């Protein structure tokens, strides 16, 4: 079985994010939050399991999850 | 290639409203294309008019932004002249089934190798929230302030009856399934229809008090089931997701080639 990928970094494009909150709502580990500008940021990156549910559902294509193995 | 390499990034952020499901459909489509390892040069995207049709401006394929409802007619022309290219036609529900209803059923009937993606948000978003043939009874819209009395089409049943050889449905909540279905639709030789239920929080959501975009997506989880689920027996109102039709039939361009060959024999 493939080893579970570990998070390296959240790449969030603040110019593309429109603050709809879809990623915040569906994150199973409650990692993401909207800031005072209604832009998403990783408030608790240490909890991230790199499931990429935020990345695949983001309607603004503003989130990319980079994992340790070099995959994105 | 990363999914972002398939985008015309200079046009971002895109014009869709915050939380618009069409962005998620674009996201799913890019993933499908990337996973298939396709080159930008082998894809043609033809679209009509509406919020959904703006998708063709954002992808770095060969793109045509054409007339309202007529994208399939343009796509048919492209496919016949360059059958080696993959032709994808994203359409809104009104674009596909009201304005372009006839083009839609006849493209299904011909079984030409085109992938049609119906981004169904059940309303005309761009023009201000008028009801579409997909809105359904009891829905509120700008043009139905006391609720709609028009019955809706079922895209899946319609495409199946008209002869499409690949028919599938998913939602923006089920983005991974949507990617998988788009992949299979692109690989299928013949006319493929993928309906993706897509939220319009600005018009459909507000007029029908469905909450924010995330609530509307959550709702898709609640009202849909995989094909053949026993839950559907208990609650016939549930909408099925998955592949409804996947069959082989003579493809239009190949049949046309045969005619050319026959005619050239003299």
Image (spheres, grey):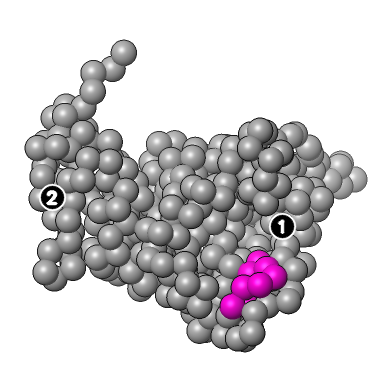
Given the image, what chain letter belongs to the residue carrying mark 2? A
Q: Separation of disc 1 and disc 2 at Cα?
A: 40 Å
Residue at x 71%, y 47% (from the top left corner): B236
Q: Which residue is mark 2?
A: A42
* Magenta-span inclusion, residue B132: yes
In the orientation shown, which residue stands out farthest toward the front? B234
Given the image, what chain letter belongs to the residue carrying mark 1? B
Q: In which quadrant of the rendered image does the C terminus of chain B lie?
A: top right
Horizontally, is B2 left or right of B47 in the view? left
Q: Residues within 10 Å of mark 1 (few under 14, many from 20)?
A: some
Label 2 secondary element: strand
Horizontally, is B40 left or right of B185 in the view? left
Q: Main secondary structure of the magenta part?
A: loop
Which x, y percent locates residue B54? 45, 70
Horizontally, is A11 left or right of B233 in the view? left
Q: Which residue is mark 1?
A: B154
């Amino acid at each position: 079985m493939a080893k579970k990928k570990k998070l390296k970094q959240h790449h969030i494009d603040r110019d593309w994010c429109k603050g709809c909150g879809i990623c915040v709502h569906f994150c199973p580990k409650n990692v993401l939050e909207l800031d005072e500008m209604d832009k998403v940021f990783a408030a608790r990156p240490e909890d991230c399991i790199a499931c990429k549910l935020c990345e695949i559902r983001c309607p603004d294509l503003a989130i990319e999850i980079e994992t340790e193995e070099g995959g994105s | 290639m990363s999914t972002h390499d398939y985008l015309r990034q200079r046009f971002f952020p895109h014009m869709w409203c915050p939380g618009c499901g069409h962005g998620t459909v674009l996201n799913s489509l890019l993933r499908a294309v990337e996973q298939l390892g396709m080159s930008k040069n082998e894809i043609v995207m033809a679209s009509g008019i509406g919020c959904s049709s703006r998708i063709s401006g954002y992808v770095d394929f060969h793109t045509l932004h054409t007339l309202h409802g007529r994208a399939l007619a343009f796509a048919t022309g492209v496919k016949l002249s360059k059958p080696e290219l993959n032709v994808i036609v994203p359409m809104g529900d009104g674009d596909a089934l009201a304005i372009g209803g006839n083009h839609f059923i006849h493209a299904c009937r011909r079984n030409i190798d085109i992938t049609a993606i119906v981004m169904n948000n059940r309303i005309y978003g761009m023009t201000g929230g008028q009801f579409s043939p997909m809105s359904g009874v009891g829905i509120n819209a700008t043009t139905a302030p006391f609720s709609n009395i028009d019955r809706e089409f079922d895209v899946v049943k319609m495409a199946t009856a008209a002869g499409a050889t690949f028919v599938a449905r998913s939602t923006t909540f089920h983005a991974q399934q949507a990617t998988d279905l788009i992949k299979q639709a692109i690989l299928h030789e013949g006319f493929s229809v993928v309906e993706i239920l897509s939220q319009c929080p600005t018009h459909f959501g507000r007029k029908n008090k469905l909450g924010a975009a995330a609530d509307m997506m959550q709702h898709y989880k609640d009202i849909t089931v995989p094909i053949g689920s026993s839950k559907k027996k208990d609650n016939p109102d549930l909408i099925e997701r998955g592949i409804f039709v996947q069959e082989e039939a003579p493809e239009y361009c190949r049949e046309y080639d045969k005619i050319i060959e026959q005619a050239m024999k003299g």
